[in-house]
Amino acid sequence: MALTLEEIAEEAGVSRSTVSRVLNNGPHVSARARERVLAVTQRLNFHPNAAARNLAAGRTRSIGLVIPVAVSSLFTDPYFPLLIQGITSACNTHDYSVMLWLADIEQERQIINKITRSGMVDGVIVASALMDDPVVQALLEDHIPFVQVGRHPTDERVSYVDVDNYNCAKELVGYLLRLGYRRIATIAGPANMIAGHDRRLGYQDALRARGLVPDPALIVEGDFLEDGGYVAMQQLLARARQPGSGGLPGAVFVASDAMALGALRALREAGLRVPADLGLAGYDDMPFAARTDPPLTTVRQPIQRAGVVAAETLFDLIENPHTPPRRIILPTELVVRASTDFGG
């Protein structure tokens, strides 16, 4: 049975309020009384209930992690496990726990109500940011501290951690153009996701910077998942077989490594070789990118680090709620491998 403050007070020969002040490191306690209370707690192996102390202070020391995707996507997209590892690592370091909420579009209203009315968390991280996410608007309206992984396209009140998806995609496509590729296709991310939108725009502007007009026939939208990349590449190959299409593109920029893996599978099934028949580049630099056949040219973004920084930024916002929003852009790196070895 757990000890009560009254029992400790009786053992130490002090009042209950004195015990409470000692356990909460409060002032106005004599050195002798403090020593007697601590001696009793040590002898009886007493540990204060951390949850009760946090609630009394108006804190739960828990944060919510909202991933607005279906449950199946969490286990098929390699991005999310890395992000979650970073977030949980920071939570462990700072003595926070994390509560995971998954929600597709139909479930978002229910998730919003749980977050804003339950009082179960001190703050929230929103991952996989959508262009117009009702969770974000609800958090703003209810003044709940939160950080978004991915920039917000319009609202300057939102704190976020991101990479420069637009310029990274523009740099990679510019690199393909400098190699000599001309007809460059893309398997883009979902248009309703900020990262998908920014990477597609970077692709288009890289072409325009070289005086090339983006061809809608060379743009197929995927879902950031391997099977989506497989289907999208099949669509591109079907279009290339149409009369007057111009044939195969010279290279394909794929907006995630997971989709690039699916695209490679579709190309192998079609009897096409990378990079002999066409070049292929991805985005993320997932651990498998260096082991594909051929190894994949890609943009390395620090996914796990983004999770750590998002969590640490949220902890700071919880402790300092009246400070300005944080907008943190993490560095990236273009990683060149054999999948874009231009043959002329």
Image (cartoon, grey):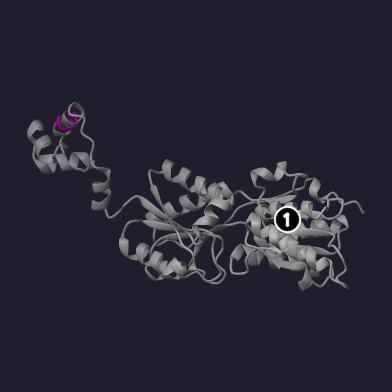
Name the chief secondary structure element in magenta.
helix
Question: For residue 234, what is the image quadrant?
Answer: bottom right
Taking 303 as reference, is 149 above or below it?
Answer: below
Q: Report the quarter where the C terminus lies.
A: bottom right
> In this view of the protein, can residue 199 be seen by the observer?
yes
Looking at the image, residue 99 sits to the left or right of residue 148; the answer is: left
In x, y percent, where is residue 269?
77, 53
Looking at the image, residue 179 sits to the left or right of residue 198; the answer is: right
In the rendered image, residue 46 lying in the magenta stretch gets the answer no
Picture residue at 87% right of the left edge, 65% below the top: 247
**SS for tag 1?**
helix
In the rendered image, residue 37 lying in the magenta stretch gets the answer yes
Q: Report the quarter where the N terminus lies.
A: top left
Taking 339 as reference, is 236 above or below it?
Answer: below
* Residue extending furthest toward the top: 43
Question: For residue 172, what is the image quadrant?
Answer: bottom right
> In this view of the protein, can residue 255 be seen by the observer?
no
* Residue extending furthest toward the right: 344
In x, y percent, where is residue 124?
42, 58
Count of marks, rendered view: 1
The crowd level at tag 1 (other Cα within 10 Å; few <14, some 14-19, many 20+) is: many
Residue in the foreground of this view, choosing between 210 and 270: 270
Specify the segment rendered in magenta.
35-39
Residue in the foreground of this view, choosing between 258 and 86: 258
Please name the amino acid that badge 1 sits on. Answer: Ala
In x, y percent, where is residue 292?
73, 44
Picture residue at 51% right of the left edge, 60% below the top: 70
Q: Which residue is mark 1?
A: 263
